[in-house]
Image (spheres, rainbow, N blue to C red):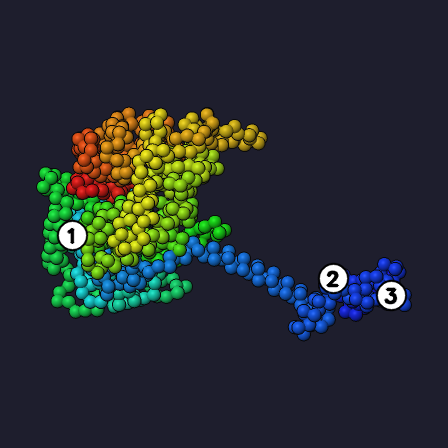
Amino acid sequence: MARNSKDTRRRLASGDKDRDPTVQMHHLGGSAIVAGGSSHSNGHHNNGGNGSNNGKSKHRRCPASAGRLGFWSSFGLTDSAAVTKALLVLLSVVSISVALYYQHLVHLREMTVRTPLNSPKMLSENSTSPLMDPDRYWGTYRSHLYFGLKTRSPSSPVVGMMWMTEFTRNMPPPLRHWCDQGDSLLRYGWLKHDGVNFGIQEIVEDQYTIRTEFIKRPGGDYGGDWTTKIKITPKSSERHVVVSLMFYMALDGPGNLQTVTTQNRLKSISGYVKELGDFELKFNKATSTHQKYHHLVTYVSNLDILKETVQGHLKVDAWDKGRTLPYFVLRGRSVPRDAPSGPNFIVHQVTAVLPVEMEIVFESQSYRRENSLQGDSFTNLLNSYVEEFDTKFENTFHLKEKDFKTEEINFAKAALSNMLGSIGYFSGESQVKSIYTPEPVKYWETSLYTAVPSRSFFPRGFLWDEGFHNLLIVQWNPTISKDIISHWLDLINVEGWIPREQILGSEAQRKVPAEFVVQHNTNANPPTLFLPLQKIIKTLVKSEKPEDRAFLKAVYPRLKAWYAFYNETQSGNIPGTYRWRGRDPLVKRELNPKTLTSGLDDYPRASHPTDYERHIDLRCWMALASGVMLDIAKTLKMDWKPYEETYNMLTDNQLMNEFHWSESKQQYCDFGLHSDKVKLEQPKAPPPKPGQPPIKLEKVRVNVFEPKIQFVNSFGYVSLFPFLLKIVNPDSPKLMKILKDLQDTQLLWTDYGLRSLARTAPLYNRYNTEHDPPYWRGAIWININYLALQALHHYSTTEGPYQSQAKTIYDQLRANIIRNMYKEYSETGYIWEQYNDRTGKGKGSHPFTGWSALVVLMMAEKY
C-alpha cells in the first residue's frame, strides 16, 4: 500500500492520472480491492478466481466499475477518465437545463400577468377606424381638457383650446388648458351632447362666459369634417376685458404640418398623417372690435407638456400704440435644433376685446364637398342636431310627461351630456405587477373607449365606475354602451383579470400619483359591468338578429374567464363566501385598513385583515354575475348548470343569513377579526439631539379592546347589499327590518339621500389616518342611492307583505335626491362626487358626472 501510495503521488505530480486504476475508480465513485498485506485481501474475495496465489499484490477492478465502463463503451468511451469527463459534462448540461427550465417557468409566470386571454376579441383590430365607424371617429375624446378633440386611433393628432385673461395682476396670467379644480371656475360643462355628432358647452369665468359649439359632418375616408365655434361674452358691457384665445394642433406620431400665414395671422394648418390622410385646419378671422394675432410653431416630445411649452414661448408685447399696456404673445417659429423632425405643435393665438367669436374648420381632403361647414351651414346643421337631441331626450326619458319644469329638464340634459361628452379614447400600456414579477411590468399596448368619472379629477377609466356609467349610456345609445363594454372586456388577461384603473398614455399618467399607477393582479373590483349587461342581455336573448347572437357568442368566453377569476382568487375560506383581496394587515397608521378593491375605500371592515374575513357585498356581486352568466349560457345552449347551482347557492337566504346575519344587531354584516374600540394615538418620540427641534411621530392605531372573531356591526351601505341587489326574498322579515332601518334618521335616512354609514357607527365621519378625511363614512353617494331606488322600485312592484312600505320610502327618497341635486347644481353650477349628509352640500371632486349622472334615470324612473 505504501508503494502504491507513493506511485500514486508520483503520477499525480506528473499529471499522469489516467494510468492509475485506483485513481480512476475513485473518480468514478467506485471501489478497488487492493491485494497484498493480508490473507483477507489475498484471494478470499477474488470474485470468480481472478486473485493470485503467489503472494504478490494486484489491483482488481470491481464488477460494478466494470459494468459502468461496459455501458459507456457502447458510446465509444473505453477508459475511466473519458467516462469521468462525460459524466461531468452530462452533470453540467443537466444543471444548466434545470436552471434554464426554472428560469423559463419564472418567465412564463412573469408573462402571465401581461398575456391576453386566448379567446377571440370582442372588437376587430380596425373596429374604430374611419372606414368601419366613421360617425364616431372624431370626438371630444380628450376628457381632461376644457375643450379638445381627437380621433379613435392610437396615435391620433389632437386639437385643443387654451386661454388667458390679459391685463391682470398676475404676470403672466394663468393659462387654462386641462380641467382643474384649482382654476376655481364658476361653472363649466356640456349643456347638450349626443355622444356622436355635436356638443354645446359653457365655461363661466368671473368676468366672461366661453361657449364652445362643435359639430361633425360625414364624408370621405377619414370621418368627414368638423367645425368648432368659440364665443366669449363679457358679463358686463361696461368692463373692458381682453382675452387671449389659443387653438392648437399637435401630432402624437409621424406626420407633417405646414402653416399658411398672412401678416402674422395664421390662416390655416395643412398636413398629412396616416390616420387622416391630407387635411386642412382653417382659422377664420375672429370678429371683435379689436384683435391681434400671433402663433407658435415648435416641436414637443410628449402631449403632456403642451401647456408648459406654450408658457415657455410667451413674450411681452405692447397692446397700445403708446406701449403702456404689456400683454403676452407667442413667439412665432421656434423649432429646436435637436428636434428629431419638423414642427409637430402649432398654436393659433387671437387676443381680442370681448365679445369675440371665432370659427375653426377642419376639412378632410379625401372628398369634395358642396360647401364648407361654416357660417349659415354650421348654424343650420347645429340647429338640426339640437332639435334631434331634444326630441330623442324626451322620447327616451319622458320628463315632460312627469311634469318636470324646463329648468329641471335642462339639468337632466346637462347631466346626460356631461356623461356622453366626457367619454374618452385612451391608448398606452398599464403598469402591472404579480407575485412573480419583482418589478412592475407593462401590460400589452391597448386602446380603451370609456366614460370617465370626473374630467377634472378622474379623467380616465375605472372598472367599477364604468358599470354604473353604462346604466345611463345604454338607455341613450346601446351601440356606444356595447362598444365601451367590449373595449373593457378585451382587456382581460389569461388569468381572467382586468386592471381596475386604466392609466393609458402620458397625459393620463401625469394626473395620477405614483403610488396608484401600478395595478396588482391579485386585486379585483366590483364586477359592475354585469349591471348594464343584465339589461343588454335581456334584449339580446330574445333577438334572432345575427349581430346580437354574435355579441353573445363573443362576450360569453370573456365573461366566463372574468367570472372564474373572482371565484378562484376572491373566494373565502368557506365555500360560498368571498373576500376582497388587497387589504394590508401590517398597516399601522390607518384606523381601519382600506379596502380599495371593493370600491368603498375606507368603509369600515374587520379592523384586523385576515384570510378568514367574509365580505357580504362581494358575495352579492357574485350572485348578480351568476344570474347573468346563467342567462347567457342558457341562450347559447352552453353548460349552464354550474351557474345555476352557484346562483341558487348565493341567493339562498338561509345560507346567506348563516354567514352574514347578525342576530344581536339584526343586520347583514361582514365577518372577521374585529374590534370597534380602536383609536389613533401619537407614539412617544425619542428625545431630540441637542439643538434639534422635538421629533413629531405620525399617529398610529392602538387597540383599546383586543379584536376577536365576530360580525362587523357597522350599519351602512355594505349592510344593504342583499337588499340593493334584490337578493332578500320579498316576504322575508329581514326585508321589513331593512326598510325600517332605511327610514331611521339616526342610521341612514337624510333629507338629501341615504348616507353611507350610520350616525351610530363607531367610525362615522372619522378620519382614517391623521391626514385622510372620511370618504365612505357618512357622505351621500349617488350610485348606491340609485341601487337603493332600484331595489325599492322592485319590492314595491313585486308581490309581498312590504310592497306598500317600499313604495312610500321609494317616493320620499327619490324626491329628496332629485330636489337636493338640482338645488346644488343651480347654486354651484356643478354635479358633485358626493353630498354632505347633514347639509346636502356638494363635496369632493366636481364636476362629477360619472355615476352621479344617474340622477337622470331616477328622474325618468328607469331601473
> In the image shown, does 533 or 217 lie closer to the viewer?
533
Instruction: Answer left or right for 538 relative to 104.
Output: left
Q: Vertically, is 473 above or below 840?
A: below
Q: Amino acid at mark 2?
A: Gly
> In the image shown, does 767 or 373 lie closer to the viewer?
767
Would you name the residue on which mark 3 appears?
A: 57
The part of the image, by quadrant, that contains residue 336 is bottom left
Q: Position of residue 306 (x, y in %)?
A: 33, 54
Q: Amino acid at mark 1?
A: Thr
As measured in the structure, the alpha-carbon distance from the residue carrying label 2 to the one carrying label 1 is 107 Å
Residue located at (40% from left, 55% from top): 494
Residue located at (48% from left, 37% from top): 586
Asked if residue 384 shows in the view, the reply is: yes
Which circle marks residue 30 in the picture?
A: 2
Q: Secondary structure at mark 3?
A: loop
Q: Amino acid at mark 3?
A: Ser
Residue located at (57% from left, 59% from top): 99
Q: Position of residue 231 (x, y in %)?
A: 18, 51
Q: Position of residue 92 (x, y in %)?
A: 63, 63
Q: Vertically, is 521 above or below 746?
A: below
As measured in the structure, the alpha-carbon distance from the residue carrying label 1 to the one carrying label 3 is 124 Å
Q: Nearer the viewer, mark 1 or mark 3?
A: 3
How crowded is the residue under tag 2: few (<14 C-alpha within 10 Å), some, or many (20+)? Answer: some
Tag count in the figure?
3
Which circle marks residue 570 in the picture?
A: none
Q: Vertically, is 295 above or below 760?
A: below
Q: Nearer the viewer, mark 2 or mark 1?
A: 2
Q: Secondary structure at mark 2?
A: loop
Would you name the residue on which mark 1 appears?
A: 289
